[in-house]
Image: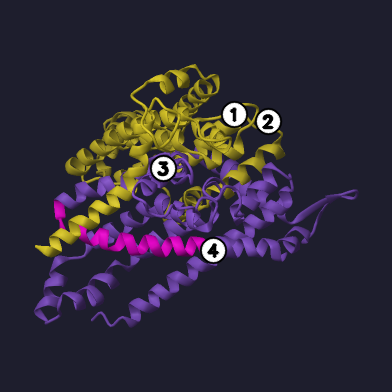
Amino acid sequence: MNRKWLATPYLIWMVVFIVVPLVMIFYYAFTVKDANGTRFALDHLMKSFDSKYMVALGKSFLYAFIATVICLILAYPLALILVKRNKGGAAMLFIFILPMWMNFLLRTYAWLSLLETNNGLLNTVLRALHLPVLDIIGTPKAIVLGMVYNFLPFMVLPIYNALAKIDNSIMEAAYDLGANDFKRLLKVTIPLSMPGVMSGITMVFMPAVTSFVIPNLLGSGKVNLIGNIIEQQFLLTYDWGFGAALSIILMIIILISMAIMQRSDEDMEGGAGLW
Amino acid sequence: MVKKGIERLYLGLIMLFLYAPILTLIVFSFNDSKSRAKWGGFTLKWYKNMLNDPMISKSLYYTLLIALLASVIATIIGTLAAIGIHVMKKKTKSVILNVTYLPVLNADIVTGIAFMLFFVAIGLKLGFTSMLIAHITFNIPYVILSILPKLSSLNKYTYEAALDLGAYPMQAIWKVIIPEIMPNIITGFLLAFTLSLDDFVISYFTTGGGVTNLSITIYTMTRRGIKPEINAVSTVLFLSILILLLIINKRTDRNTKKLGGINI
């Protein structure tokens, strides 16, 4: 008996429960049901291009983009500091990525109870200090804050891994060749850590752009992002075909932006003049 | 010296940002007053309420049952799959692995609605079974990915030696390969269990008929307003995940040291 047959149960499982469900999304998105039965149609896709939904899509990308940039700005120096500490840094890394494993709902809920305008702890402290209160629940600011908080560890981990991999002798060579600290960071460290930065961006941007829990809880349902609209199609208005079409559009745009980023990464590496 | 100080301050600030919300939640789970800003004395009443709340205890039961069943089944299917995939031709292998990565890379909401459409289409009522199938499916890739690297670092001649010495292939796999990859199987299992315990989005779309897990219960409760009982649930959930992770981390550490395995 050949060992490869052991994979058979999984292969059957994979086709039935991974491939077929994804095909179902396409089936629902490109068909309509009417008196004449089910037929191929682009109605759902056309409806998706309505300005109402495009605005939600645009907002989702905007907020996710801002959150990703903030994560990057916060995470890069953090990863640099941790890598410099060698062994102690590796132990500390655990502390910084631990929240990644905490229940996502719980993390969002924690901010909800902190930020509450009247009873939240943050505003009580601010009031006691006679500072202006923070009234951001239900606004895009709270949503972006929630995204940064939830997904920051996803940015720290890959950047740390990429930085830890850089061979120290390259840094020494740059130093011998007369580069100062700033130049080394700009010309050696940053270009060599780009793969980590790229996977960090992907790992933050993807869940941020598709999130519906954060806008529902921290945005008090006042800000509708694309994730919310998709959720509503399935659990509220039962327009499954339209929901499927929206999620296909979302996936395609994500794929395209990832592809563009991967390309600009290659260009940058080629043009950075590393050697 | 100044630079060191700034670095420490930076680490401290980010740590504060990451942990302050969670610590506040934990502290206020022992707060006697219903307010989320004033301390009214120490109490365990929210924990008592939590244990007496039928909705919370029911969802805790489903969370544990599904996490356990899903991770055990996923570990069995995934281990067999990894052993099989390992000896496949390069091309077949890469096709299969790419499909395996799909649920890992795809947005959760898309995976969730794909399952929902699928279950409705085959006429399976949304509930326990559908949620279990979904959990098994998103767990299997993590089991495979924790075992495959170890398989390629094994000495392939020990398996052949076992065959030469008269073992049946099944015996050789059971007695030679499985013991060698056991640490990775257990890591994969723990990883699957943790992920399953923690899942919200996919469960949310694949469940129905009153079957909920803790994440869904927290979500429903939060949307109806904040209750101190949620703080108690959160604290318990946080501590259990923390303990599980420390175990996983210890195991991977040991494996890396002993066998040069791959950290996840």
Q: Colour of chain B?
A: yellow
In the rendered image, the vertical position of residue A30 relative to residue A105, given as above or below: below
Discs 4 and 1 share one subunit: no
> As drawn, is B139 to the left or to the right of A235?
left
**Residue under numbered circle 1:** B129
Q: Are marks 4 and 2 on the same chain?
A: no
Sequence-earlier tag: 2 or 3: 2
Q: How is the image coloured?
A: by chain
Query: What is the span of residues highlighted in magenta in the rendered image?
Result: A63-87
Q: Chain of mark 3?
A: B
Real-space Cα distance between discs 2 and 3?
27 Å
Question: Do the residues at pointers 2 and 1 share their chain?
Answer: yes
Q: Marks 1 and 3: same chain? A: yes
Mark 2 residue type: Lys
Q: Main secondary structure of the magenta part?
A: helix
Which kind of residue does numbered mark 1 sit on? Thr
Q: Which residue in the protein does label 3 denote?
A: B142
Q: Colour of chain A?
A: purple
Residue B222 rendering spot, x and y as whole percentages: 53, 36
- Tell me, yes or no, whether the highlighted magenta stretch contains residue A81: yes
Q: Which residue is mark 2?
A: B125
Q: Determine whether the residue tagged by mark 4 lies in a helix, strand or loop.
A: helix
Task: Work out whether residue A46 can be spotted.
Answer: yes
Q: Nearer the viewer, residue A33 or B172?
A: A33
Evaluate whether residue B164 shows in this view: no
Whether the residues at callouts 2 and 1 have beta carbons within 8 Å, the answer is yes
> Looking at the picture, do discs 3 and 4 lie on one chain?
no
Q: Residue at x 59, y 56 (%)?
A: A225
